[in-house]
Image (spheres, grey):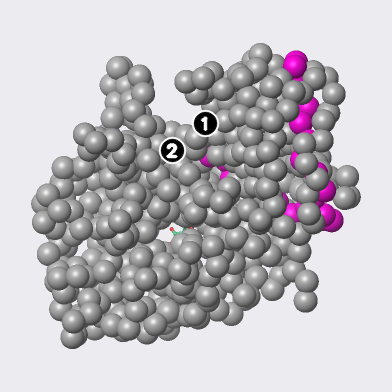
Amino acid sequence: MTEPYRPRLHFTPRRNWINDPNGLVWFGGEYHLFYQYNPFGDLWGHMSWGHAVSTDLVSWTELGVALPETDEAMIFSGSVVCDHANLSGFGKGDAPPLVAIYTAHHPTTPQRQSQCLAFSQDRGRTWTPYAQNPVLDLGLAHFRDPKVFWHAPSRALIMVVALSEANQVAFFASDDLKSWRALSTFGPAGCDGNLWECPDLFWVSAGDEAGGGTWLLKVDVFEGGVAGGSSAQLFTGHFDGESFLPDRDPQGKVKWSFCDYGPDFYAAVSFSNLPAADPRPLWLGWMANHRDAPLHPTTPWRGAMTYPRRMQARSGPSGWSIAQAFDPPLGPICTEKAMLARQVNGGATQVLARCSPGKPVWARVQFARPRQTVTFHLAWSTGARLSFGFDGASGLAFVDVSEMGQEAYRQPNAQSRWTMAVEANALDEIDLEVLLDAASFELLAAEGVGALTLSLFPQGDCLSLSVEAKGDLTLRGEMGQI
Ligand code: FRU
């Protein structure tokens, strides 16, 4: 069976619906990806945790259902820790247990959500729910998506979890994962959106010898984010083991930004227990959102994860920003690669490269910050065109799918063009990196300080990459296929 929308480099399940990545953990030489999964159909429902593993983050082996829904509850999002010191007592023998901390969603009247545990003693292959679940129940209808990590300075396990309707996250601490004490809350803050979900909190290093860096608190907002839809908000600041103290601007307002300016980067979560050789935070998200995903025309599955991204903190005059880099980097894994050094004449459209049909396309380009617009086009055999580029007048990078006939795959009146502010680098150049993989497009700008992700469903073959500039342009870069 040919599956034209099946990506090559992004995780998709063989069949059925997926949403959030859950319980990302590196353990036993494998990256484990658990995810919100409906074992019975290609729409949201019967939420359970599916499980896949990879050694390279690019090819995944799907293992099946790890945590099935029960008669009482669905298994909503959460995290996994590797309990090295067997604080939970779930371990036996020498190998540390993996412990999943997830939300049990009781679709009762009134609805109820509480935090529960399950453990695995066999590298995540089989799981046993803790007999005394739940471990944290505030009697709330919306209380979900616990992310747990070991906080060395306070020698405690910390949980960050969403108080969704209050637009808050709450922090709890534990010594054994079973009993939790309340520490503090953070929010409302950031954009004017509603319903906070899927928080994550971790340290992002600047990679300098002085050990600089920042804490990053990410929390998704279900509606009211980028283009009014679902988005991930990012706060930098300090976590002292009790509270998150956000960075503020000179007027005292809490600083924030979006992690991604496209419509389809949601519920991202970072891997825990990364190898000591490279502990830099690494995450991936669900490449969709709840409103549009049911319209995606893929079959027999529905849903994909984003390409993994590695994070680094950058300090600048206005504070910290976070750079995301595709990881593993795409240049080195391209099989067909071409340099893109070109002199582009203003006004004309110039083909940069022909594409081999059916293969992911990767490109990275740099050019002097233009006064006007520089537009790159990916062109399909059907005449559809995706445009991305940079508008010098506004300082905005953009992705535009209005010439792609994508209306059926988004809610009525949805945007077909998305933008984000992008700064030039020290050489006064604009840097854009893109990955097209069947049904997805990801743009990283300014070495990943800006990201813009969307799913898309073109028909036919992608044939070429070209550039169109209003003024003359010196372009350098690389392009490849995988
Ligand atoms: C985010 C989310 C989570 C919830 C899960 C249910 O996409 O709504 O808050 O745990 O999906 O599938």
SS assignment at label 2 = strand
Which residue is disc 2 drawn over? 323
Image quadrant occupied by the N terminus: bottom right
Residue projecting furthest to the right: 382
Residue 115 pos. (x, y %): 29, 67
- Residue at left offset 46%, top offset 72%: 53
Place residue 351 in its image quadrant.
Answer: top right
**Crowding at label 1, few (<14), some or many (≥20) Cα neighbours within 10 Å?**
many
Residue 104 can be seen, yes or no: no
Mark 1 to mark 2 CA distance (whole Å)? 8 Å
Which label belongs to residue 446? 1
| Dot 1 amino acid type | Ala
Q: Horizontal and vertical percent for residue 443?
A: 59, 41
Q: Residue at x 15, y 71 (%)?
A: 85
Q: Residue at x 60, y 34 (%)?
A: 432
Q: Which mark is residue 89?
A: none
| Residues at discs 1 and 2 in contact (Cβ within 8 Å) | yes
Q: Is residue 18 magenta?
A: no
Secondary structure of the residue carrying tag 1 is: loop
Res 217 visible: yes
Q: Which residues are magenta?
A: 451-472
